Amino acid sequence: MSKVSINIPEDFILGAAASAWQTEGWSGKKTGQDSYLDLWYKNDRHVWHNGYGPAKATDFYNRYKEDVALMKASGLTHYRTSINWARFFTDYENGIVDEEYARYLDNLLDEMKREGIEPMLCLEHYELPAYLIEKYDGWSSKKVVELFVLYAEKAFERFADKVARWFTFNEPVVVQTRVYLDAIRWPYEQNTSKWMQWNHHKVLATAKVVSLFRKRGYDAHGTIGVILNPEVTYPRSSAAHDRQAAHLYDLFYNRVFLDPLIKGEYPRELLDLLAKHQIHFAYSEQELAIIRDNTVDEVGINLYYPHRVKAPSREWNKETPFHPAYYYEHFELPGRRMNKSRGWEIYPKIVYDMAMRMKTEYGNTPWFISENGMGIEDEGRFRSQETGEIQDDYRIEFIGEHIYWALKAREEGANCLGYMLWAFTDNVSPMNAFKNRYGLIEIDLDHDRQRRRKKSSHWFSALAAERRLSLTLDDEDK
């Protein structure tokens, strides 16, 4: 073990992220403004830990001034959240803005500006309106692509003078992977063709919004990007069969979005494998041209833990519909370092490895860590009896190690713009609700969601002020 110290450039983001649905709650929400998450919660509440869901969330809608003050106290330079598409309109077909909700967003953005925190806005963080699911089957429909572009147009018109950095989607692969590929979330439909159709329509929607952003001149003082969650994937061994399993895992889950949104085209190998397995989705040459000509300005990358795979050892059931798991099995590294609360391996070097990939394979396009964090169950056991403050040294260590690898990669030429923590406060996660706590700020569910700073909040504030990271690493990790 040895101590290391590294400077943090002045332009390196030290921020945090959350979403509208996980923070705002339902205050002020009107009938007919449910999102996919609201619909899931209402239809399947028993799978949410202790029944908590988006109804109350952290009550950010009513307490944003208090929370923005805590952002400033915690040293955040940037904060990324989303506009809740389902709440932004009273009429999705005609783009009629809900002025009450829009005024809340105006007030939030003004408050952040007063406190010197730069906002980043994402247009969709799982908040697809329930109306569009029920009428058009969600992203299965090209009509929804057009309605998303209409939504983006109205959002830009309203907020482009206050927000310079925009993102179309957060983790666009996730909802359809959980619902239509793995069938582990409501409404539990295994349909790999629908999975790919949703993928394609989100890629196309992003390209069309990028085109709109530039045609309307918003690129003169802003950028348009996307938030992805590529799973940094390692083979079990150096053997060809394991390396092939990792290659194909990466192809289906990572390159399906990375390649078209950054390079402008789907991998030919991916399209060939989908065709081989009779996975069909509707697309045209014109759509591929739109995707080719409208790649994003920057990419946020959500990184939490490594993914390890091996070649499959079992025979595929021929009666089972095609799933990418035809080509791989998950692998757990013996002796791995673990966050036992979440069941995730801790391997901070994923940041460096992803950075080098962005540098060598994706033209060193601008990118930043848009989410990274550590969820801990029953965090109250770490509360100081003297001060009442949660002593989350494990979170400080986790954040520090991941920032270290980002800075090391940047020193080696990676175009990494910064680090954003998930999350600023504890908040609701799908199904897990408040079971695992991620925040710099504690949310006390037993006392009207009272806010309390954790030890990590004070540490993060000092880090942002001093612009120097000091930590202890294993010698092999330096």
Image (spheres, rainbow, N blue to C red):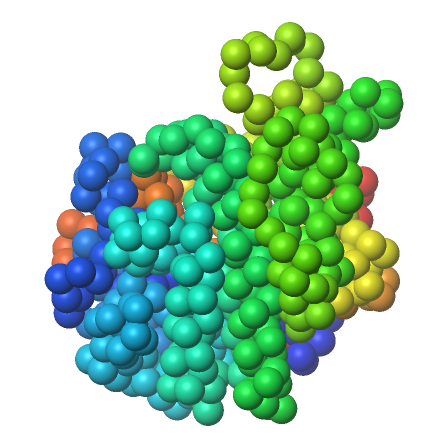
Classify residue 165 as left or right of residue 474.
left
* Residue at 50% from the left image edge and 48% from the top image edge: 198
- Report the number of numbered marks: 0
Report x, y in % for residue 400.
61, 56
* Residue at 46% from the left image edge and 57% from the top image edge: 142
Quarter occupied by residue 242: top right
Given residues 451 and 363, the one toward you in this image is 363
Q: Is residue 336 above or below residue 21?
A: above
Given residues 10 and 45, the one toward you in this image is 45
Given residues 383 and 20, the one toward you in this image is 20
Q: Quadrant of the N terminus?
A: top right
Q: Is residue 197 above or below residue 341?
A: below
Report x, y in % for residue 41.
24, 43
Report x, y in % for residue 428.
32, 50
Q: Can see residue 135?
A: yes
Classify residue 236 as left or right of residue 338.
right
* Residue at 60% from the left image edge and 76% from the top image edge: 211
Classify residue 127 as left or right of residue 350.
left
Q: Can see residue 462?
A: no
Q: Is residue 437 above or below residue 46?
A: below
Report x, y in % for residue 246.
74, 31
* Residue at 46% from the left image edge and 71% from the top image edge: 149
